[in-house]
Image (tube, rainbow, N blue to C red):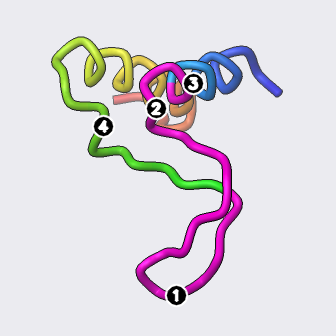
Amino acid sequence: MEQYKRDFIEFALSRNVLKFGEFTLKSGRKSPYFFNAGLFNTGADLARLGEFYAAGNSGKCGRF
């Protein structure tokens, strides 16, 4: 796994965005994890999220 993916997971865990346990989703389906992106709610969090997005898309969009 690439380092930026590991860093993203650690970031999500540090912000309590990614949680592990037993969750029942709105659909009624059971899940062993829950990802609440709404908790990325500060400017600093959003800036960091953008950095991960850019790292994941680097070289995939072609040249402009």
Camera-nearest label, 2 or 3: 2
Query: What residue occupies the far bottom of the structure in this picture?
Result: 28
Q: Please tell me which of labels 4 and 1 falls first in the chain.
A: 1
**Are discs 2 and 4 less than 8 Å apart at CB?**
yes
> Reading the chain from its start, which is encountered first: label 1 or label 2?
2
For the N terminus, the image quarter is: top right
Q: Position of residue 9 (x, y in %)?
A: 62, 28
Secondary element under disc 3, as helix, strand or loop, is helix
Distance from disc 3 to disc 4, alpha carbons, whole Å, reads 14 Å
Q: Is residue 64 left or right of residue 58?
A: left
As shown in the figure, which amino acid type bears the numbered disc 3?
Phe
Residue on which the image places disc 2: 16
Disc assigned to residue 8: 3
Which of disc 4 and disc 2 is earlier in sequence?
2
- Magenta residues span 12-32
Q: CA separation, marks 4 and 1?
A: 22 Å
Marks 2 and 4, how far apart at CA? 7 Å
Tell me which label, 2 or 3, sits earlier in the chain.
3
The spot of residue 48 in percent (x, y) is 36, 16
Among numbered discs 1 and 3, the one appearing first in the sequence: 3
**Amino acid carrying mark 2 in the image:** Asn
CB atoms at circles 3 and 4 under 8 Å apart?
no
Secondary element at image label 4: helix
Q: Is residue 36 above or below residue 29?
A: above
